Image: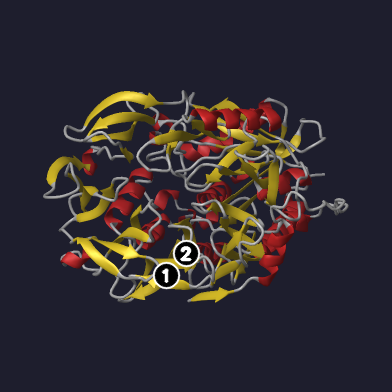
Amino acid sequence: MIIRQLAAMAALLFAANAYAQEAPKPAPAPLAPITLESFAATPFMEDPELSPNGQYLASKISVNGKQLLAITAIFEGGGAPSSVAIDGSKTSLDAWAWVNDDWLIGWVSANSNVEGDTWRLRRLISVERATGKTMPLQWSGAAQDAADVIWIAKDGTPRILLGVQTSIYTNEIGFWTEVREVDVSTGKAKAIQRPRMHMMNYFADAAGAIRMAYGYDDQNRIGTLLYRSSGKGSFATLDKARYGKDEELSFPALFLPEPDKALTYDDPDGFDAIYELDLKTMQRGKKVFSVPGFDVGGIIETPTGDGVAGYSVVENRPRIHWIDPAMADIQAKFDKAVGEGNAKIVSWDRAMRYLLVKVGGPDQAGAYFLYDRQGTGSMNRIAFVDNVLKNRKFAPMTTIKYKARDGLEISAVLTLPKDKPAKALPLIILPHGGPQVRDYEAWDWWVQYLAWKGYAVIQPNYRGSTGYGNDLFKKGYGEWGLKMQDDLNDAVDHLVAQGMADPKRVCMAGASYGGYAAMRAAQRDGARYRCTISYAGVSDLAAMARYDSRALFGKEWRADLKEKAPDFNSVSPLRAPAQFSSPILIMHGKLDLVVPVSQSRNMVEKLKDAGKPHRDVEQPLGDHHFSRSEDRLQFLKEMDAFLNQHNPAN
């Protein structure tokens, strides 16, 4: 299931970009003409992370269209690179993290047949930096989830705290999490917290002391918090919440050095902000940090893990608000040099000497640079994000606001084709997936391809989206396929009223929930759209609820979906194929582990029976995330041909 290989090509590519200021720079090669194929390559580098000593880099890289977890030395003489390849047809590498300078951990998942049902299993591997050797961690005897990393040591030792299930049956004690201290270099482990009935998640402080436990009763939908001040001795019940009555619990986002003090997220003003929290009384203290109009997304911890270096917020663009004065000063210098929002510090070593900076705006794929705070202050390029597009600039993005028909203000990202008047343009409306996410100004290969073709593209953050406060999010409850769909139509009307869009040349496209919205548009509002395009879309909410219910605590998943769409059948496109009134392109990856391919297969069969115009394409090695260049290229070619037929840009 897991294949290790030395990536000779990756070694050559990294060596070409090695950090060596004295090496002469060759003259840049002339840029090739832009074609459809230019947008199809998977990013050369994704999610890079510096090792604790700042000498090594781990990232997902693309080699011959396939993605590897690659580990390489940044400086000359640091050793040969190594890599780990995951067989994407069976297993997904979901994330990774450094434990110390010699070892990493990786989160992997796969679907498996469990007593006749398909379940999603989560596991953990360790990866040796020097060789790429992998080792399964606590797989023997594990049940559905054995990948709950509660804590990673910060003293250089290869230790983590790992939560593991050993049974799939809720009436057995092994179903509930056991916490083990695991040496990732040997795989040896010892239990430090035996399982307790209904206790599923544990929280540790910076020193690795387990301070809190969270329990959930799926039958009664009751959540419980247990707490102990020192991390030793008995837990005491701290708080309970009945989720069926909209009660909530406050969780610690960061344990502070002061006894029984933590930071937490809360939204008494309607937007997620950071507050002090008294863990003895669960009383919320003063507000520590907020950004008007946006939810705070995350806490950037200090290297010791018990303090705050900054806060991450997705405003119109992602941003870190640095609390550390030195880091704030460096960020200000980057902003001055390349423009605010165009440089983001994405990783750093434990001493915060070496900073990995991603430079590139929404109109540019960009590159990763290494900045040495103790050096000359120069930025040394590590790699382009996209080796095909490199530093070319494409269509600009802006954030606009419009009013939905009921007066709700909606934010949306608008991309207009470059060097073309913003008047009566053909329009693609591109709703995001989720739907509990949001769009913002950032490089997007799909959007930029459409703008390059000559389309205006609008990405509405319709009701039910996150990031803009609780009110917008809650307004999505009960509105799948209804007011959420109206918000998309109202975005079209706004651009038409502004004179930017031609109302007779509009199509909708999307993936995942966006694919559902495209199907729903073809079925409910086909007169508005010349065509629709669905990738990995949901057509049948009842079937999707059954599929999701195989995850842990499936009753809560189903209840949540029921709140968002109380009547599955009335808003499921599958149930009304005769109502489809615009042609639709339906594409899906056979290996999709998020939305099963049956969602598209069944929709296609219904459309065939109803005699409705459609084109369907199934990608035999495709997944939910366009992880392969071949699948991206095929998708762009199919979309290009479909748009040329039904809604040409010229």
Write down the quadrant of residue 363 in the picture: top right
Asked if residue 626 shows in the view, the reply is no
Find disc 2 in the rendering and name its residue: 593
Please, is residue 470 above or below residue 538 in the view? above
The front one of 265 and 495 is 265
Closer to us: 596 or 289: 289
Name the amino acid, label 1: Asn
- What residue is drawn where x is 58% and y is 34%? 317
The image shows residue 313 at horizontal and vertical percentages of: 49, 34
Q: Is residue 602 visible from the viewing direction of this image?
A: yes
**Colour basis:** secondary structure
> In which quadrant of the rendered view does residue 272 lie?
top left
Horizontal arrangement in the rendering, residue 368 relative to residue 517 (left or right): right
Horizontally, residue 238 falls left or right of residue 28, namely: left
Say what secondary structure mark 1 lies in.
strand
Number of dots carrying numbers: 2
Give the crowd class for mark 1: few <14, some 14-19, many >=20 residues within 10 Å. Answer: some
- Quarter the C terminus occupies: top right
Which residue is located at x 69 percent, y 63 percent? Answer: 634
Is residue 6 shown above or below 428?
below
Q: Where is residue 642 in the image (x, y as percent from the top left)?
A: 72, 56
Instruction: Give the numbered dot on residue 111.
Output: 1
The residue sitting at 23% across, 43% down in the picture is 244
Lower sequence index among marks 2 and 1: 1
Residue 309 vertical placement versus 546 (above, below): above
- Residue 266, horizontal then vertical, whole percent: 33, 31
Is the Cβ of the residue at disc 2 closer than 8 Å to that at disc 1?
A: yes
Query: Front-most of 322 and 264?
Result: 322
Mark 2 residue type:
Leu
Counting from the top left corner in percent of width and height, residue 327 is at: 53, 33
Direction from residue 575 to residue 159 in the image, left or right: left
The image quadrant that residue 469 belongs to is: top left
